[in-house]
Image (cartoon, grey):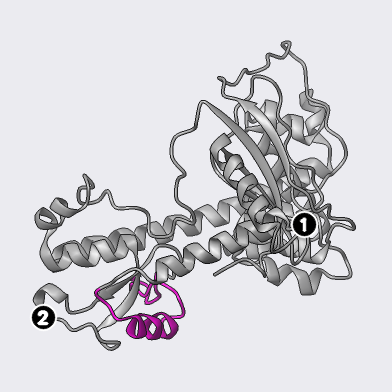
Amino acid sequence: MNDTTLLAARAFHSRLTDLLGVEFASLGAFLEALAEFDRRKLFRDLGHANLFAYLHEGLRLSRSAAHHRRAAAWLVQKFPEVLEPIRDGKLCFTTAAVLASVMTEENSREVLPRFYGLSKLEALELAAELKPRNVVPARTVVTRVEAAAPVESVRPVGQVDRVDPPAPAPGPGTDAPRVRPGESWATRTVVEPMTATESRMHLTVSREFLALLKKARAGESHRNPGASDEEVLTEALELLIEKQRKRKACVPARVKREVLTRDEGKCQWKLVDGGICGATVRLQIDHMVPRGKGGPSTVENCRALCQAHNLESARRAFGDAHMDLFTRGNKAGDAPVAREAVAGYGPPLPLTHRASFLVNPFTSPG
């Protein structure tokens, strides 16, 4: 990276920072106006039955976007103090909607700051801690899903969806999604926090996976009769992690352990604002002075980097043309996103199953 490109990057960063501030301020102004619009029931003068219908039909927002804005507007009406963190970018629509389900007059001062800067999943986990489900059934539910193109329903012109009074955002206490004939599941894994220590995981799996799980459960029954699916999968994951640790590497195991401990298991790539990437997935050990240039595999010369930033480090050391020979078709600029939370699980299978597990994140391996 030369001085010219660095100056250009910093100029863009400054402009994007300013635009982001405008976005946050506009979001706060929008919610403040929407809260007053709802308080005065002005949507009725425009022919809409309720605020959700106005947002969905009048402003043509998606149902999800309309729900989150409606919940945030109700939150602003009841707790005007949330406008300041929204304008500062500490709260967004999705986290504000989750916050609305647990914030009360009694806990507002304590609870509000705990939602600052959280992702949707983190907000749901906090809400589950503050307002856990009374009874969490521990079971595995397997539903057969035929792969088919999703069929969209057509509503008569002028029909407005019935909207009940204020309801919390989907999260703790909600039922798992249901499968209807003709619908297809997304291949991503969905985690639904239930309590402070337990979550329900929904994932799409193949018949081969179910057969392997059944075989593993039967084999485990001799040593641990009545073992749950979580116990079987936990042991399998522990064995996988142990196998990964034993893989031969150019960095001695002792050095790798010390580096990961020192770097707290986070990517140490420096950002322009002085912080670090901080990603905790796909971590690799990077040589600050590359091995190809004589750098030793010592704790002092090594650091933890995510896969994307390790590749970026190599590109800066050896050049794009050289590194393109080793990246399986990924050209410069096409590296994985450094902060992505999960990897893809491959293309959907013609016939899959949807499995739901209740898991305890505090007892999972890793």
**Residue 187: quadrant of the picture:** top right
What residue is drawn where x is 80% and y is 55%?
101
Disc 1 is placed on an element classified as loop
Range shown magenta = 250-277
Amino acid carrying label 2: it is: Gly
Question: Which numbered marker is on residue 319?
Answer: none
Q: In the image, residue 251 lies at what x, y percent?
A: 27, 78
What residue is drawn where x is 70% and y is 29%?
179
Residue 83: say if magenta: no
Residue under label 1, please give it.
Answer: 226
Residue under label 2, please give it.
Answer: 294
Amino acid carrying label 1: it is: Gly
- Crowd around label 1: few <14 · some 14–19 · many ≥20 (10 Å): few
The C terminus: image quadrant: bottom right
* Residue 279 in view here: no
Q: Earlier in the sequence, mark 2 or mark 1?
A: 1
